[in-house]
Image (spheres, rainbow, N blue to C red):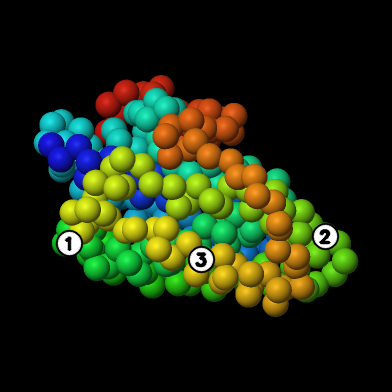
Amino acid sequence: MNTGLYKYILGIADNCLILGQRLGELCGHGPNLETDIACTNLSLDLLGQVRSYYQYAAKLKADDSTEDDIAFLRNEREYVNVLLVEQPNTDFAYVMGRQFLFDAFHLMFLKELQNSHDITLSAIAKKSIKEVSYHHRFSSDWVKRLGDGTEESHSKMQSAINDLWTYTDELFHLTEADEEMIKEGIGVDTPKFKDEYYNHLTDILEEATLTVPESKYFHKGGKLGIHSENMGFILSDLQYMQRTYPNMQW
């Protein structure tokens, strides 16, 4: 098995899985019907992308593992998603702030992943980029609407951005698997578009009449399997059926 490639795939897919799970928690709880359905569709898009990644990962393992095993039967420390995507749905401003900060990165990442020497990853990126382009439009539009809305919506959106900003730098941390895949022309050298990412965030936040946070402190650890307290609660819901009824077939 190509261990480096397997770990690299998990590093991409786990972000989408955990964020998709977070969005799925909102089903039936959106501020209005249209937005509720839109958030559910974002979740479904991400989970669809996850299936493609995990199917490829299961193929690389070349044992009896399935996409479900990889998704549902790992321990907490074996998930390598960034801390940003596991942050709770505090309120709608937090939901859209978290989505926006990830979407801006995800879209830039997929644009580069299309050029991967790995034809499977390249194909997944080309298939996913249209969906993620919509995700980014949706979340950035809501950041603008809330930021440049009422006094209350502005305050809540600013609070969300201030809190979530401290999780953004981890998006650009390179693990050993990242570095190995970059050398092989498979992975994306994310630090190369770090400045572009923050410039883009600044443009959107200024349009939303929001203040760009000046914090120089950033949380990290998720990409190494060291998660916040939120992760255990997410996995208790995510993994419940598989662990309660092992090997169940639908």
Residue at x-position 32% and y-position 67%: 112
Q: What's the CA distance linking mark 3 and mark 2?
A: 27 Å
Amino acid type at circle 2 is: Ser
Work out whether residue 229 or residue 134 is closer to the camera in this orientation and state it: 229
Residue 117, numbered label: 1
Using the rendered image of the protein, determine whether residue 120 is visible from the camera's viewpoint.
no
Q: Residue at x 48, y 30 (%)?
A: 226
Residue nearest the observer in this picture, 186 or 232: 186
- What is the x, y in percent for residue 57? 22, 43
Sequence order check, earlier mark of 2 and 1: 1
Q: Position of residue 149 (x, y in %)?
A: 80, 72
Marks 3, 1: nearer the viewer: 3
SS state under label 2: helix
Front of the two marks 2 and 1: 1
The quadrant where residue 107 appears: bottom left
Tell me the residue that label 3 is attached to: 195
Residue 155, compared with residue 141, is above or below; it is: above
Amino acid at dot 1:
His
First in sequence: mark 3 vs mark 1: 1
Q: Residues within 10 Å of mark 1 (few under 14, many from 20)?
A: some
Classify the position of the C terminus by image quarter: top left
The label shown at residue 155 is 2
Q: Nearer the viewer, mark 3 or mark 2?
A: 3
Residue at 35 percent across and 69 percent down: it is: 111
Q: Residues within 10 Å of mark 3 (few under 14, many from 20)?
A: few
